[in-house]
Image (cartoon, helix red, strand yellow):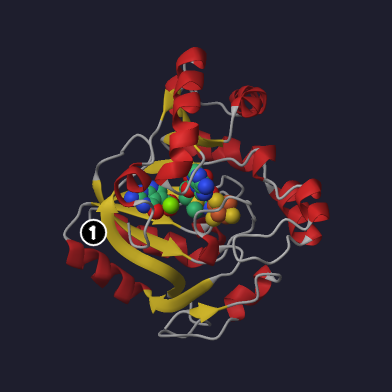
Amino acid sequence: MPVDADPADPASEDDAGSDGADPSADDALPINELFHSLQGEGRLAGVPSVFVRTSGCNLRCWFCDSYHTSWEPSHAWLGLDEIVAEVENYGADHVVLTGGEPLMHDESVTLLDRLDAAGYHTTVETNGTIYRDAPIDLASVSPKLASSTPSADLVAEGTPRPDGEPVDAAAAERHEADRLDLDALARLVETYDTQLKFVVTGPDDMAEIDQLVDRVRDAASATVADTDVLLMPEGTTRDALDGTRGTVAELALERGYRYTPRLHVDLWNDAPGT
Ligand SMILES: C[S@@+](CC[C@H](N)C(=O)[O-])C[C@H]1O[C@@H](n2cnc3c(N)ncnc32)[C@H](O)[C@@H]1O
Ligand SMILES: Nc1nc2[nH]cc(C(=O)O)c2c(=O)[nH]1
Ligand code: SF4
Ligand SMILES: [Mg+2]
């Protein structure tokens, strides 16, 4: 049974009531879902992979497609042995560690060590605000743009979140303050094979993307090719993507960046476990 934590207090997530392994143990992670699917996004799109989704996030994107890892986290605590055993059951050789923000958790490093030792290819989906030293084969970094912030306008208008609750001004301010960390981004790019995968809501996002890519190139000693920069249309349903994917594809073509689809939305409309 999943466990709900107080979304207004990210610290409480670590202390939330447990299901399964003891949350105070150093060999467990709060898991929102664990499933087998085709990688839907990025350079490895189409590759059969096991997804391990941790719960808890330091950001609050208004569009988050994993609402129950961020705004309203729910999870069961699973021991690392259990997680590895579940992964092995699926027989895939690629594992995607995602969230929420998986790099918030110390135990994610231990899990990656275990998966690496077992011979898996590991991708980590991260918002790029946290650096950790771990065996990561592909760092799939998705820095968050101004357009991800639950804006002051949204807060003032009381525009509801997907669960119908008004947006909390403090959460919006924290998100805006924390969404970018150039040092963490530069270290990720320098250390790992990295793709920078931006969620694009429209043409107005492009100036910030160009500027951020330039800043990362200046800060990091590693090269970031234009084809390591991926534009991904915002949208959690086929209908929503019908409205954004054409524009985003044109922007990628115009700018020389790479386009990435959201195959799991095209194929399964982002149903849980896909
Ligand atoms: C749920 S996040 C988890 C990993 C990490 N917190 C992050 O944001 O990169 C997984 C991926 O989904 C993307 N994403 C989340 N909501 C989205 C949406 N509405 N449309 C397109 N991509 C979205 C994120 O940018 C990220 O690349
Ligand atoms: N099929 C599929 N591919 C994905 N790639 C990244 C995902 C994520 O939520 O991090 C994801 C996901 O949730 N499903
Ligand atoms: S950083 Fe990722 S998990 Fe966190 S709110 Fe944004 S999209 Fe969701
Ligand atoms: Mg997803």
Rendered location of residue 161, percent (x, y): 65, 60
List x then y, in percent, for residue 241.
45, 39
Residue tagged 1: 118
Whole-percent x, y for residue 131 in the image: 56, 48
Q: Is residue 210 visible?
A: yes
Asked if residue 83 is positioned above or below residue 98 in the image, the reply reads: below
| Quadrant location of the C terminus in the rendered image | bottom left
Q: Is mark 1 within 8 Å of ligand 2?
A: no
Quarter residue 260 falls in: top left
Residue 59, placed above or below residue 266: below
Looking at numbered disc 1 in the image, what kind of residue is underneath it? Answer: Ala
Q: Residue at x 52, y 66 (%)?
A: 68
Is residue 44 left or right of 194 when viewed as pictured? left
Task: Identify which residue, 88 or 210, lies in the foreground.
Answer: 210
Residue extending farthest right = 156
Q: Nearer the viewer, residue 26 or 103?
A: 103
Residue 228 x, y percent position in the rendering = 44, 27
- Between 228 and 137, which is closer to the camera in this rendering? 228
The residue located at (70%, 39%) in the rendering is 146
User: Total label count?
Assistant: 1
Left or right, 5 with respect to 244, comes to right
Which structural element holds mark 1?
Answer: loop
The quarter of the picture where the N terminus appears is: bottom left
Q: Quadrant of residue 91?
A: bottom left
- Mark 1 residue crowding within 10 angstroms, few (<14) / some (14–19) / many (20+): few
Q: Going by the picture, which residue comes out furthest to the left?
A: 91
Residue 135 seen in the current view: no
- Side of 86 relative to 43 (left or right): left
